[in-house]
Image: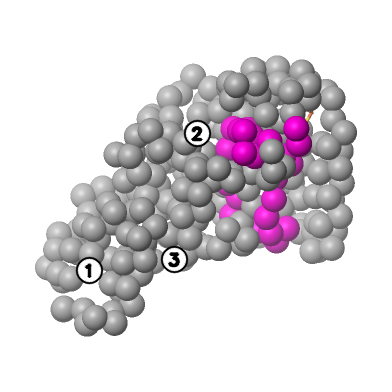
């Protein structure tokens, strides 16, 4: 089947390529050719979704609880990272979000603005979220540590351990259906049993965090330095899209 100029799949592919996902070109080829071979690798199915059985907080309770954490974080001096910060970065997003993204910690721009993922890496994350057919405002974005480490170094283990209860509480409140872990620090923070695993080995495979499906992938900052890894991240995000019943480009269109 040859799609017309106003074919929705083709149009969406054009938009995504404009956003910097040029590697999606191959999916356009697939969309144009019904006889194109199927993808070689079939992703493993996500773990069983047990979240429906959990009690869920009402919107106003979530807003109140998330705001309480943000207020607590704003005055937090529990670890040495409080000394170098301009602003705390507790995280932001839809209190009813079904999808959560977790990164390492604030960088320069995030520290200046008090918001997560607002620099170049943040722009790329926003593009990834939109390519997944979500709006940034529909998801929740947080970090393992809420204050900027000096010179953007990785957070020390004790800093992560001290700050993690805030993130755990946010997850408890949100009860997202799925979490995307961005980079190895996020993986080590949320899944300490996997701290010896490289991101190369861990990415692309569903994990379970107390009944929540977790997909580790590379951090957007890594993608800015290693453009070839964008394709791998997109493979991982396609699994997340499928988990939410969204059709990646070139499939079912
Ligand atoms: S990084 Fe976390 S634990 Fe450390 S001071 Fe900031 S909010 Fe508190």
**Mark 1 / mark 2, whichever is N-terminal:** 1
| Percent coordinates x, y for residue 239 in the rendering | 41, 53
Identify the image quadrant of residue 198: top left
> Pointer 1: what residue?
31
Q: Nearer the viewer, residue 72 or 193?
A: 72
Q: Residue at image x 81%, y 63%?
A: 58
Label 1 within 8 A of ligand 1 by Cβ: no
The segment highlighted magenta reads: 86-111
Task: Tell me if residue 96 is in the magenta stretch.
Answer: yes
- Determine crowd level at label 3: few under 14, some 14-19, many 20+ residues with C-alpha closer than 10 A: some
| Percent coordinates x, y for residue 249 in the rendering | 32, 65
**How far separated are the C-alphas under marks 1 and 3?**
16 Å
Instruction: Indicate the secondary structure of the residue bearing disc 1.
Output: helix
Residue 76 versus residue 56 in the image, above or below = above
| Percent coordinates x, y for residue 236 in the rendering | 40, 47
> Pointer 3: what residue?
246
> Pointer 2: what residue?
183
Q: How many marks?
A: 3
- Determine crowd level at label 2: few under 14, some 14-19, many 20+ residues with C-alpha closer than 10 A: many
The answer to whether mark 1 and mark 2 are in CB contact below 8 A is no
Instruction: Indicate the secondary structure of the residue bearing disc 3.
Output: loop
**How far separated are the C-alphas under marks 1 and 2?**
31 Å
Taking the image as drawn, is residue 102 in sight? no
Q: Nearer the viewer, residue 85 or 216?
A: 85
């Amino acid at each position: 089947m040859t799609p017309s100029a106003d074919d929705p799949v083709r149009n969406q592919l054009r938009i995504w390529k404009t956003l910097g996902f040029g590697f999606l070109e191959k999916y356009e080829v697939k969309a144009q050719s019904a006889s194109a071979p199927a993808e070689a690798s079939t992703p493993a199915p996500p773990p069983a979704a047990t979240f429906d059985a959990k009690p869920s907080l009402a919107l106003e309770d979530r807003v109140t609880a998330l705001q309480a954490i943000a207020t607590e974080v704003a005055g937090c001096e529990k670890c040495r990272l409080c000394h170098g910060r301009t602003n705390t970065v507790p995280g932001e997003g839809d209190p009813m979000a079904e999808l959560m993204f977790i990164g390492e910690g604030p960088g320069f721009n995030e520290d200046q603005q008090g918001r997560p993922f607002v620099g170049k890496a943040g722009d790329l994350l926003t593009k990834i979220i939109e390519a997944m057919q979500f709006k940034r405002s529909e998801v929740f974005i947080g970090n393992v540590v809420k204050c900027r480490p000096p010179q953007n170094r990785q957070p020390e283990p004790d800093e992560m351990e001290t700050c993690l209860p805030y993130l755990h509480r946010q997850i408890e409140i949100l009860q997202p259906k799925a979490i995307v872990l961005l980079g190895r620090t996020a993986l080590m923070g949320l899944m300490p049993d996997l701290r010896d695993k490289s991101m190369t080995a861990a990415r692309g495979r569903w994990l379970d965090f107390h009944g929540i499906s977790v997909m580790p992938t590379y951090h957007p900052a890594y993608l800015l330095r290693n453009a070839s890894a964008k394709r791998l991240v997109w493979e991982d995000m396609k699994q997340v899209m499928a988990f939410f019943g969204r059709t990646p480009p070139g499939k079912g269109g």
